[in-house]
Every structure is written in C-alpha cells, then in structure tokens.
Amino acid sequence: MSEPKRLHPITSVINFLKSLKEFIAPFIIIFLFGGKGPGLDLWQMIFTASFIVLSLVGGILSWLRFTYRVEEGELRIESGLFVRKKRYIPFERIQSLDFSEGLLQRPFGLVTVKVETAGSSGLNNAEAVLTAIKKQDAVAIQDILTSVKRNQTQYREIEESDIVYTMKPSQLMLLASTSGGAGVVISASLAFILQFDELIPFEKVFKELQGYISNGIAFVSIALFLLFLLAWFIAVVGTMFKYAGFTVKKVEEDLVISRGLLEKRQLTIPLNRIQGILISENIIRQPIGYCSVYLESAGGSLEKNSSKTLLLPIIKKKEVAALLSPFLHDYCFSPELVPAPKRALKRYMFRGLLLPLIIAAAAIIFFRPWGFLSLVLIPFAAIWAFLNYKDAGWSLHQQQLTLTYRGIVKNTFYMRKNKIQSLTLARSPFQERQALGTIHATVKSGVGPSGGEVVDIEKQDCLTIYNWYTYQ
C-alpha cells in the first residue's frame, strides 16, 4: 500500500452534499427574508445556481487532490486545493480506527475510516478521515495498526473475538420505547415549521382550529394524543434504525462497538483511555431496573464533540457488574453509598419548589381563572425535589470515588483516583450554618473535563473525600 491512492469517486458527491448541508441556514435566510421583488428573485436564482456549481466543482477537486498511503510505519495523507498539505501519522500514535458505512458508501462496498489519536477529540475533530475506501483496504490498515500494537504480524479476526454484549430484539424495542425521543421530535418539527412563517398562513390555520376547539375539549385531547403518538412512533423507529445490531466485542486491549441498520458504524475504545464509567437511569427505566452505561474516554472513538460513548444502551442494572468486571476489574460496581443527611431534605425541597411557586403565583395573578391550572406543577415539583434528595450519595472504595446524583435522569459516576483531574469542595454561607457542603469531581475527557456533583452532603464527608484525594 506504498503507492498513493485516491478515495472512491463517490467522495466528490459526499463533499458536495456536505457543502450544501453547511449552508442550508443561509439559504433559508436568503429565500425567506430576502424580499419579494422580481429582480431579487432572479438574483436568488443566480446565487443558488452559482453556489451549487461551485460546490460540485469543489467536491470533485477536493477528491482529485486527496491521496493516502501507508509507508515507513506511517499513514501519509496529502490534500488541499491551493495549498498542498501533508500529514504523516505514525501508527504508534493512532489510538483507534472507526469504521462506518453510510447510505452512499454501502452500495459500492465502501467504508469511512476515522483515525483517532490521543490528541483528537470527537468524530468531527478526528486526526484524519478517509471518506470512502474499499473494505479490504480499511481492513489492511487495521491489520497494520494491530500488528504495530502487538509487535507481531499475525492478526486475530474481529469475528473471533469475545462478545461482551449483544442487544436482543426485545431490548432494542424497550430502548426505543423508553428513550424519551418524542419531545425531541416535536421540538425539532416545530422549530422547522416556524422557519416558514411567511409561507404558511398560520393566522388562518389558527382561526380554523378555534372553531374545532370551541366544540369541546375532546377534540383537543384526541389531537394532542395523536400528535404525541406520532412523535413517539417516529422516535421509536429512528432509535431502532440507529441501534439495530448493537454489539460490543473485546479485541485485545480494545472494546469494539458495532451498530446501525441504514448506517453501520464501528467504534473502537482503547481500554487504557477509559477515564470513568457513568450509569444513567431515566424516570421510566429506573422503576423497572434498567439503565444505560456510558464510558468517559480521553480521545479515542467518540460521537460528535463529546467523550461520552454509549457502551450498553439498555441493560438490567443488577447485571452491569457481572458484565463489565472481567475487563474493568479495577472498578467496584456495587459500593456502599452514603446518602445525603435528613436535614438536607428541606434544602432540596426549597430549591425544587421555588421556581414552580413563582410561576404559579404569576399565572394566578395575571391569567385568572386559567392560571389556577398552574398549581398542578407544585406536586410534580415536590416529587422531583424529593427524588433529587433521595438519589444524592457518595462512596469511597479503595482507590475509587463514586458519586450519585439526579439531573433529568439519575446518574452514578465511577472514577478512579488516578483518573480524577480535579476535585472541588464548596460551602455556601447557608450550607455552613447546617454543616453541609458540595463535592464536585471531574475526569479528563476528549473536549474538556466531565464529572459529577453531589449537593448538601455532610461537611465532614466533604473533608473526608477531599483528604482522600489530596493526601492518600
């Protein structure tokens, strides 16, 4: 593979589509707010046609000017339209190679290879990206990387690796139906529709709806139910396509994650780059004993701009220890937790009820009699505040710190002492009066620190954790 190679010609189409995607927002602004005159319409057409042609030509030239080769233990890439750039990446620096098969690559038997090094952070900031190459070429590069890591030439095929986790169809359905993606679908749809307020006669639509609404609350209830049902169905289908075939395998000292139906993806996580483990339980899965497991990683295979990689999309919490302990043996997944003290409950309740009480008071004053409906927020806020208190806790187990806390979901963060980047002890004047404090710990991640925070625990407990980290 010492001869320079070009990517597959489909790369030029992918580059072209990326250019269009990046400039979709300016296009919307120009067409919706550019004016109504005929001269301007002609200008818009000329601008659009020119941009499309230039993007297509740029995509083709970028493909022609991009070459790669493996030579002298390095992956060498040359690119650039006007300024020729040469990037030499020694295989010793490469942490992982991530493979993905998009809709445009799959018909041609191609894959996208993202090269991750210790200094890269996230898929969008990979050290290098080979947009479309043959599978056998990608496997050949993977073989060389594996040989360098093992200092020998033989290579064990990934299909023969130990399977750590395979998602069953029943688990996939449970994951999709409890993902909470309906709200995201509705919000995204409304945001998109509102971009076209000049084209859609909203006032006329609302007047027509008023006639239906005046006929009774039954119509409104049914319409809202159907809306949420449709959004939930779309979210379920999207989740199933995204996580179909989810498999975790241990290959040498790496974890390899494969998933996806329409777009197949393969992520590699070096075990020595793992900084912490996060277990999340949303409000639906927690009562039935299910959770999701994430890995915090410094560099390596990451999604978007986050170092948090989903390792186990859905699993019974009581099964996590047995599944992960064989290769993450430094972690204790069932430590004895110390909860927040009882006197901290009133502080959690105060913080949780303050904003809902203000909203309810304002609604009652300014929107009578309908404002009284805002009182239904109070019991929900009280329950949520109590859950925040109940789920707050910490534990020290040898060289491991465990923090549990609730945001939207309940989180349990496991971190080893040698991986903790910073640990902060804070006490406000109000906490000082009740001998309480807040502990905040972070670990290194691909794009900055990531960690957890437990509020209103015993002051002495904060000092115990701080002394453990500082002096032991």
Image: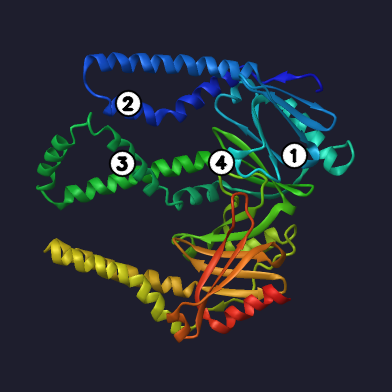
Residue designated by label 2:
30
Q: Position of residue 288 (x, y in %)?
A: 49, 63
Q: How is the image coloured?
A: rainbow
Q: Residue at x 58, y 78 (%)?
A: 462
Considering only order in the chain, which callout, 2 or 1, is on the residue closer to the N terminus? 2
Residue 181, horizontal then vertical, whole percent: 42, 48
Helix, strand or loop for disc 3: helix
Q: Nearer the viewer, mark 3 or mark 2?
A: 2
Q: Could you say which is closer to the camera, residue 305 or residue 265?
A: 305
What amino acid is at disc 2? Ile
Q: Are marks 2 and 4 in contact (CB under 8 Å)?
A: no
Q: Secondary structure at mark 2?
A: helix
**Residue 273 seen anywhere in this rendered image of the structure:** yes
Q: Position of residue 139 (x, y in %)?
A: 75, 31
* Vertical placement of residue 53 versus 388, above or below: above
Asked where in the image residue 78 lies, by quadrant, the reply is top right
Q: How far is the residue under mark 1 from the one under mark 2? A: 51 Å
**Do the residues bearing badges 4 and 3 touch, measured as CB atoms within 8 Å?**
no
Q: Amino acid at mark 3?
A: Leu
Q: Are the two marked residues, 4 and 1, in contact with CB atoms closer than 8 angstroms? A: no
Say few, some or many: other residues with alpha carbon within 10 Å of mark 1 (under 14 / 14 to 19 / 20 or more): few
Identify the residue at image location x=28%, y=66%: 377
Q: Quadrant of residue 247?
A: top right
Amino acid at circle 1: Glu
User: Which of disc 2 and disc 3 is earlier in sequence?
Assistant: 2
Q: Looking at the image, can residue 10 be seen?
A: no
Q: Marks 3 and 2, Cα distance to the nearest angstrom? A: 20 Å
Residue to which mark 1 is pinned = 159
- The answer to whether residue 359 is above or below residue 2 is below
Give the distance between the C-alpha atoms of the residues marked 4 and 3, in whole angstroms: 28 Å
